[in-house]
Amino acid sequence: MIAVATELSRRPSIENSYTNFLPGIQARYSAANDRLIFRASITEAISRPPPGDLVPARQENAQLNQRIIGNPALRPASSWNYDASVEYFMPPLGLISAGVFHKDISDFVFSSSRITADGVDERTRQNGEGGSVTGIEIGWVQQFPSLPGLLSGLGVEANYTYLDSEGVYPNRTDALPLVNSPEHILNGVVSYVQGPLSVRVSYNYLSERIESVGARAALDVYNEHSDVWDLVIQFRVWGDNSLFLNVKNLTDEPTVQYVGNRGNPTLVTYYGRQFNFGLNFAF
């Protein structure tokens, strides 16, 4: 990949300042000897754009036929957040939880894209007009020390999130979700800890999500759904010192992008499996 940053022909002069008062209220109620906990909150929050998005520069990538332009006029996003959850602690080592939430968002930041007269995919970051997201999340964490023999080292973790989002984008009247907000998110972990050995296999699933918004639906860029498996193995050799092996993306899952619809894929990127191994010393 070759990317070259060049200064824009005019040196911009842009000033921006803001003051935020971020109120919040939280409530907690416990029952069943603190094994059952209810939580609720109403808060306001802001999210500032990454500094790299504010740099008034232009990046050209000939391999991807892509141009990225910075936007120093970006405003921070703000949101009102409404959350409620319940947790139940299961002896000896377990937890199940469920929660609902809703967020009303102003000035969210998204990537816009257009095809220029010279055929380049030009992208920049800009503020949306407003949006919202409503979701449900459930989770389960459990260790099994009561199982017989070697099975007592087993453990599981799982969580699932459902998102229903909507964003209002400049010059678009059709209904669109918020960028990078997949409808379904699933994570799972199976772990094993016994004596000096520790093994952890994790899985992450993201459903398809819109990555950048074009002038019309045919120019919207999407990321296809992804399934990623990771592996961590650690073996304690003496004291607190241990050997470790980390493997990311076990199945060599690619990143697939398409424009408009799945029949028009534009980018398939294979990152390969990443191996990391060594020895941890504790001093």
Image (spheres, rainbow, N blue to C red):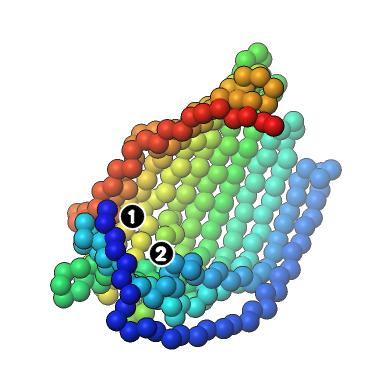
Q: What residue is drawn where x is 44% and y is 59%?
A: 181
Q: Residue at x 33, y 38 (%)?
A: 272
Which comes sooner in the sequence, label 1 or label 2? 2
Instruction: Name the residue carrying label 1.
Output: 223
- The image shows residue 152 at horizontal and vertical percentages of 65, 20
Viewer-proximal residue among 146 and 213: 213
Look at label 2 and name its amino acid. Answer: Val
Asked if 138 appears above or below 234 in the picture, the reply is: below
Q: Residue at x 51, y 38 (%)?
A: 188
Circle 2 Cα neighbour tier, 10 Å, few/some/many (<14 / 14–19 / ≥20): many
Q: Is residue 250 left or right of residue 80?
A: left
How many labels sit on residues? Answer: 2
Which quarter of the figure has residue 234? top right
**What is the distance, in whole Å, between disc 1 and disc 2 at their CAs?**
10 Å
Q: Which residue is mark 2?
A: 179
Where disc 2 sits, the SS reads loop
Instruction: Specify the label residue 147 is tagged with.
Output: none
Viewer-closest of 77 and 244: 244
In this orientation, does residue 174 appear? Answer: no
Residue occupying the far top of the picture:
149
Residues at circles 1 and 2 in contact by the CB criterion of under 8 Å: no
Badge 1 element: strand
